[in-house]
Image (spheres, rainbow, N blue to C red):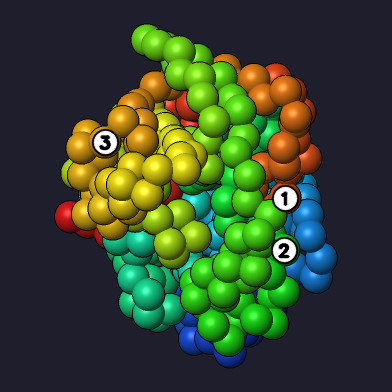
Amino acid sequence: MEKLLLIYNPNSGTRKSARYLSDVAEVFTRSGYLVTTLPTTKRGDATEYVERFAKDYNFVVVMGGDGTYNEVISGFANADIKTPVGYIPAGSTNDFSQGLDLSKDIITAACDIATGTPYGLDVGLFNGRVFTYVASFGAFTKASYDTPQSIKNILGHLAYILSGATTIPDIRPIHATIKTDDAVYEGDYLFGAISNSTSMGGILKLRPEDVDMSDGLFELLLLRTSNDLLEIGDLVRAVTEQKYDTTPMLTFVTSKRFEIDIPEAVDWSLDGEYQKGVQHIVIENKHCAVNLIRKHP
């Protein structure tokens, strides 16, 4: 009998993981797996569980939010383990899972994993630290890691918008230089993100046809600042209509590697978690570094 390790965060989202734990375990048991469950009790637990135990299991499944998933993938990267992993989204926004079209229904997501197939998935390194779908700086970035979990549980992605709105008086241009494989971009930016997802914080959306999570490339999105109301209007339309080539206020390109220099060393968000800023940053795409179990097309 194959062994499955189920790591769950009982505090993610509206505490769905804890409420559905026995039902999810039953799905995998009926599918022929010997299931071991491990709850996280503090930050870093999921990473430690993977590093210590994943090599002894045929599969690892994580049930929680994007932060818990990030911890699991960090464990795989740290221990250089290729065990297939399944993700049951049970967080407040579940940005990452939206891009993968993972079911929002807990039991359906478990069934999809039980009958699914591992697919190679890219992950990122931010000066060596693992992130799974987005590294961002600038406007609203602080809201992603500074919003209390209790508020996220109640309001979901709306919490990011409301919390981000309170930081508007503090928004100021960030001067940055970003070098990709093919070009250099320099300017004053309102927001910047390097991502492998169609959704960021439930606020910014990218077209699904522009994002391939297994192509070895990340998408770079830069929003410039301006005092010109017409230029700001063009930027807002470009973002909301997802027409990225209609204004010089917005930069949208792809690359496998980025070198970023920000003299003021502003703080970043990695998968919604805090990352202290430094002046020089290297972000790399690790092509198909994770074997994620997904339902058959």
In primary-sequence order, the first of circles 1 and 2 is 2
Residue at image location 28% in from the left, 57% down from the top: 240
Tell whether label 2 touches label 1 (CB within 8 Å). Answer: yes
The residue closer to the viewer here, 137 or 215, is 137
Alpha carbon separation for disc pair 1 and 3? 31 Å
Establish if 109 lies above or below 186.
Answer: below
The residue closer to the viewer here, 86 or 121, is 121
> In the rendered image, which residue does mark 1 sit on?
274
Residue at image location 60% in from the left, 82% down from the top: 153
**Apparent side of residue 8 relative to residue 179 in the rendered image (left or right):** right
| Label disc, if present, on residue 175 of the rendered structure | none
> In the rendered image, which residue does mark 2 sit on?
146
Alpha carbon separation for disc pair 2 and 3? 31 Å
The residue closer to the viewer here, 263 or 182, is 263
Q: Is residue 31 visible?
A: no
Rendering coords of residue 147 (x, y %)? 68, 69
